[in-house]
Amino acid sequence: MNKNNKTEYPKKALNMSEIGAKFAKKLEEIYVDVTAIPQFNDEEVMLEDHGISFFHRETQKEIAWTIRVCLTKFQEIYHEKVSHVLKNDEFRLFAETNEASLEGKKFTLIKEINSLVPYTLNVIDENGKDK
């Protein structure tokens, strides 16, 4: 650990496996199903394929966050690269930021207000320049 209490990972290439790709795609499927449901009024939502139900918008957000945490822990434990198999922009960006961190790369995440893509990931090379 460094002095800012942030975990620093050794720089090394990430693994790519069929099992990792399948696991990430399944998490992505669940994430998309959870986040795709408009939740304007409090009403019971049941995702029978995944055994997930929720009533409040806040609970929907918490479930989505939990799925992202599952992806993060999987990537940390198995040092796995999975972003290349993900199709959902938001979920793929989350995986890419995990991967950059695991590879010991510096990066910036920029929020773009008037864009269809809410965030942009800029990986910074050894010379301090955006790639």
Image (cartoon, rainbow, N blue to C red):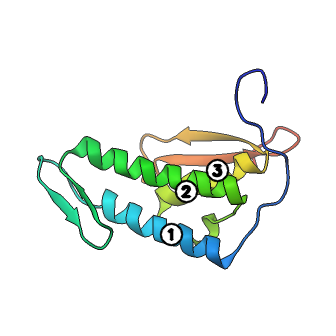
Q: Residue at x 76, y 66 (%)?
A: 15
Q: Is residue 68 left or right of residue 101?
A: left
Dot 1 or dot 3: first in sequence order is: 1
- Say if 68 sits above or below 84 in the image: above
Cβ–Cβ under 8 Å for marks 2 and 3: yes
Numbered badge on residue 12: none
* For residue 36, side relative to residue 1 (left or right): left
Q: From the image, state whether disc 2 or disc 3 is nearer to you.
A: 2
Which circle, 1 or 2, is nearer the viewer?
2
Say which element carries label 3: helix
Kind of residue sitting beneath label 1: Lys
Q: Which residue is mark 1?
A: 87
Q: Position of residue 40 (x, y in %)?
A: 15, 48
Q: Residue, x 17% and y 49% (percent of image)? A: 55
Residue 92 in picture, x, y percent from top left: 55, 60
Could you give the CA–CA distance between mark 2 and mark 3, rounded to whole angstroms? 9 Å
N-term mark: 2 or 3: 2
Quickly name the residue at label 2.
71
Per the image, the residue denoted by label 3 is 98
* CA gap, disc 1 and disc 3: 16 Å
Q: Nearer the viewer, residue 54 or 94?
A: 54
Q: Residues within 10 Å of mark 1 (few under 14, many from 20)?
A: few
**In-front residue for pair 7/105:** 7
